[in-house]
Amino acid sequence: MRFRNVPATLLRVAAAACLIGALPGTTQAAEPLPPHLVQDPYYGETLYQFYQGRYFSSITGLMVSQHFGRVSHHTDEAEILRGGLLLSYGLHREAGEIFAQLIEKGAPPSVRDRAWFYLAKIRYQRGFLPEAEEALGRIEKNLPPELEEERGLLSANVLMARNDFAGAAAQLEALAKLPDPGKMPGGANATRYARFNLGVALIRTGDAERGNELLDQLGQAPAPDEETRSLRDKANVALGFAALQDNKPEAATIYLERVRLNGMQANKALLGFGWAQAALKQPKRALVPWQELAQRDPGDSAVLEALIAVPYAYAEAGASGQSLDRYNEAIASFERENGNLDQSIVAIRAGKLLDGLLERNPGEEMGWFWNIGELPEMPHANHLAPLLAQHSFQEAFKNWRDLQFLRSNLLQWQDNLGVFGDMLANRRQAYAERLPKVRAKSAEGGLDALQKRLDEITTELARIETEGDAAALADEKQAALQARVDRIRATLDQAGDLPEAVAARERFRLASGALTWQLAQSYPQNLWDAQKSARTTTEALADTRRVDAALAQAQQDEPAKFDAFATRIAELAKAIELLLPRVASLSTEQQQFVQELAVAELVQQKERLVEYTTQARFAVAQLYDRAASQANKQLEPANAPPKP
């Protein structure tokens, strides 16, 4: 059985858990990994479960094998695999303890640095910034090039998350200067990510000119793949809105025109482009992107803003009637959307969101490799897209899903323990009924009598061998002939010296000699066969005694073993009974937490709707006031005195 080198592979598990987006073995290593011979079958079974995607079965089976000492040839590798799997489940403290112990035992530098890197990665993903920084500080210079670049990005991200933009900029400088950018997992360009983050960090530190220059370079760079094109759009949107904030609508227009109409940043770009045209006193040109944006999914805040931006542009263009109509349409749209959000909130609190996600995205076992792929059946599923894209929601939902899996697993084991109890009772009853009968039957065979008879036969064979008594080993035919010879001898002895007896004695001598010669010829073979049979009988009798002794010992030991198994089953059943309510309680708490996360996102959307509705109503009131004022001016006489 051969697998790829496990220590290098398992750490990619943690990378996948950190949402790098590749399963074990897909990330290109600096050098091809050599084949790895698996010497312990139980470790091979663990790896089989691992590569089948059954990570829970893999880690539980591995821990059982470690407990019973079944992976002695792969001690360190098994620990690294266990640490990687624990890390993939977010148990970074436990994984950190395992890695620290391995490092203390003298793990290779490459394994050590990979361990600390992925530990820092998962800590950063889970928001443990000081711990992530501490793990990054333990990394030396033994990472492969692609991970070394990613380490620099990760270190900068940690600093930026702690609002240390100056430190992040210093960290990113070296990466941004790489002439030939390396590839991160999934095809993302490490250098371009570094330049994007550096540009943002420089702007945040006050060096807007250089930051804008870096982002502008990214905004015009060739994009060979979708991820790079998305990054380019993001850079242009950042430049466009920065220019709008600096009151530079001409520059904003240039930047935002570069953004694709079908990309992730398209809505923001359309909104910003419209405001740039409005700032240039070109309301009619602003209407073009805003009207396109207003027809898109209202779940996006940019679309909601476009609904009131369109009538604003009409008003600026002097089309007050159209402006009023569009404001009223926007208010009606906001009210409908507000009602839709209420329906979504009710459905979420009723559990339809989580149950639907679990139903539409089934998984064999729990784990951090599982991702949301399909939206559930909801009244207005479009409200969920921004929510499901949030890392915090996905992490919280995975925790709830894992609790559901644990509950199901515990219930299954509860049923299994009942089956084990029935099996144990049946076996106990079988021993109680059958074992005495077997022993009684063994006693009927008379082992002592058989042993005595065997000893007699052994003694007799020794005598025969010593005396060379060939006649004692005669077969049935030879024995019959020997008996006949003995009868003839007795008859001849009684005949005395009769003349007829002389000739008969000569014939008898010849016949007796022939029989003696025949017995002498077959004696060695007969003696060997007899001794062999005696040895076989001795061994069989010894085996019988051992079996009888084992049965006697079993009659004493098995009840104790049954009691031990029964105690263990009872203890496990009690532990499961204690765990089930705890898991159920945690599951309920986590479900409420996840649902409230979703509700909070929708409430924010409702708050935006309230704000936009208020703005729209205020604009409508202004239009009515303006119209009334103009009407009053038209009704006033031309020579009327001015109002005091």
Image (cartoon, rainbow, N blue to C red):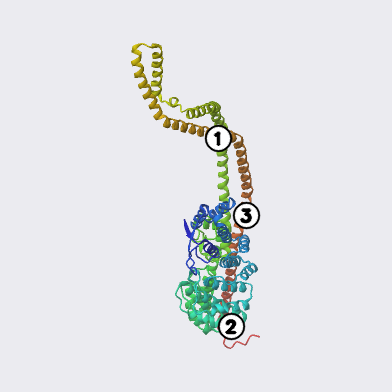
> Which image quadrant for residue 74?
bottom right
Helix, strand or loop for disc 1? helix
Q: Is residue 406 above or below residue 173?
A: above
Badge 3 element: helix
Mark closest to the chain's N terminus, 1 or 3:
1
For marks 1 and 2, the one nearer the N-term is 2
Residue sitting at x 39%, y 14%: 492
Select label 1 or label 3 by which is in front: 1
For the residues labelled 1 and 3, the Cα–Cα distance comes to 56 Å
Mark 2 or 3 closer to N-term? 2
The answer to whether the residues at label 2 and label 3 have Cβ atoms under 8 Å apart is no
Marks 2/3: CA distance? 48 Å
For the question of whether residue 588 can be seen, the reply is: yes
* Amino acid on which the number 2 mark rests in the picture: Ala
- Residues under numbered marks 1 and 2 in contact, where contact means CB atoms less than 8 Å apart: no
Kind of residue sitting beneath label 3: Leu
Q: Nearer the viewer, residue 56 or 511?
A: 511
Q: Nearer the viewer, residue 3 or 621?
A: 3
What is the x, y in percent for residue 470?
Answer: 43, 27
Residue type, mark 1 in image: Arg
- For residue 586, the mark is 3
Res. 518 mark: none
Q: Secondary structure at mark 2?
A: helix
**In x, y percent, where is residue 428?**
57, 35
Of residues 355 and 574, the one nearer the viewer is 574
| Residue beneath disc 2 | 208
Numbered circle sitting on residue 546: 1
Where is 109 relative to 311, above or below?
A: above
Give above or below for 574 relative to 155: above
